[in-house]
Amino acid sequence: MKTMTKTLASGLIWIGAWAATAAYAVNDLPGGPAVRQLNMHPPVTKIAEEQHALHWMMMVICTLIFVAVFGVMFYSIWKHRKSTGHQPAHFHESIKVEIAWTLVPLIIVVIMAIPATKAVVAGKDTSNADLTIKATGHQWRWGYDYLKGEGDGIAFISSLDNEQRVLSNSGNVGKNIDDYLLKVDNPLVVPVNKKIRIITTSTDVIHAFAVPAFGIKQDAIPGFVRDTWFKAEKTGDFYGQCQELCGKEHAYMPIHVKVLSEADYSAWVKAQQTTKSAKSNTPQLVADASAVK
């Protein structure tokens, strides 16, 4: 009876824990993390598509090798077990076997290395970019400077949305939202179907600019300049995060990229330039401290 009561109590505890978790459940975030996601993000660039193809190719090859090796091993253990009276063979070497187990892995490695090398080289080809943007890592925010292409001269800081910071500090997980710790005040805006070169650097510690849906991750290192690129093939909002542990507020350093149509991007650029022009034409009033009574 005690055992049954204990089992029932354990079951109720598990049900309660599941119900509490379900009450705070969130939905998939398009362009960002998904609930119970077991694979990489859906790709929106050719780079990410190649990474997906490589991932599955490697997975299939490794699975076949695993099944073959352990299949032969377990079959040999079972077939040649001592209880059946099997007697071990006595031999020292086999040149053919040694050549085979050297050449076969070499061929497999070459088969995997060729497409992997092509993908790595293509991922570093930042030439002929339509738009060049410098992403500067700060503790704990990103600075974006449009250096070349439509929108050159635009610059701004992108920080975690203040409401999300307040929500995180409150510890009230019951109010979790789909874009939790991913919403920013100023997203990075780029046009669709254009090659975007991202130049990374940092003012303090090592950061990393990463957007999984684009298949990119580039370290931002103080005193050094690195670059990567992407070409988004669909409009929408896509999310990433700093992927180098950069201090106590590392989790508060999201990346939000808004991909717009060419017309919408041009309109955004015009609005940004108008705002910048208005600010530069605003008279600066400087008060003489000695005149203030």
Image: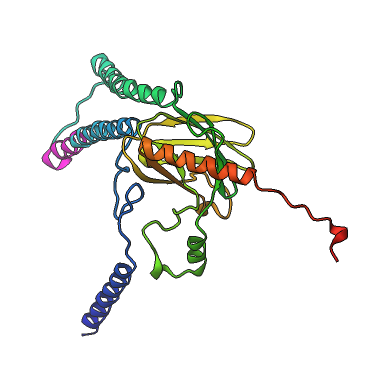
Q: Indicate the position of residue 258 as horizontal and vertical percent values.
A: 41, 44
Residue 173 lies in the magenta-colored region:
no
Residue drawn 51% across the image and 42% down it: 272
Residue 252 as seen in the image, left or right of residue 5: right
Count of numbered badges drawn on the protein: 0
Identify the main secondary structure in magenta: helix
Residue drawn 64% across the image and 43% down it: 280
Q: Is residue 155 above or below residue 46?
A: below
| Range drawn in magenta | 72-85
Q: Nearer the viewer, residue 182 or 1?
A: 182
Q: Please identify the quarter of the rendering in which residue 266 is found.
A: top left
Q: Nearer the viewer, residue 129 or 174?
A: 129
Residue drawn 32% across the image and 20% down it: 110
> Which quarter of the rendered picture does the C terminus lie within?
bottom right
How is colour applied across the structure in the image?
Answer: rainbow
Q: Nearer the viewer, residue 276 or 6?
A: 276
> Which quarter of the rendered picture does the N terminus lie within?
bottom left
Toward the left, the furthest residue is 84
Q: Indicate the position of residue 54 as horizontal and vertical percent values.
A: 30, 30
Residue 226 as seen in the image, left or right of residue 114: right
Q: Is residue 90 above or below residue 285?
A: above
Q: Please identify the quarter of the rendering in which residue 226 is found.
A: top right
Toward the bottom, the furthest residue is 1
Residue 78 lies in the magenta-colored region:
yes
Q: Indicate the position of residue 170 as horizontal and vertical percent values.
A: 50, 69
Q: Indicate the position of residue 290 as horizontal and vertical percent values.
A: 88, 59
Q: Nearer the viewer, residue 283 or 97?
A: 283
Residue 209 as seen in the image, left or right of residue 99: right
Q: Please identify the quarter of the rendering in which residue 11 is found.
A: bottom left
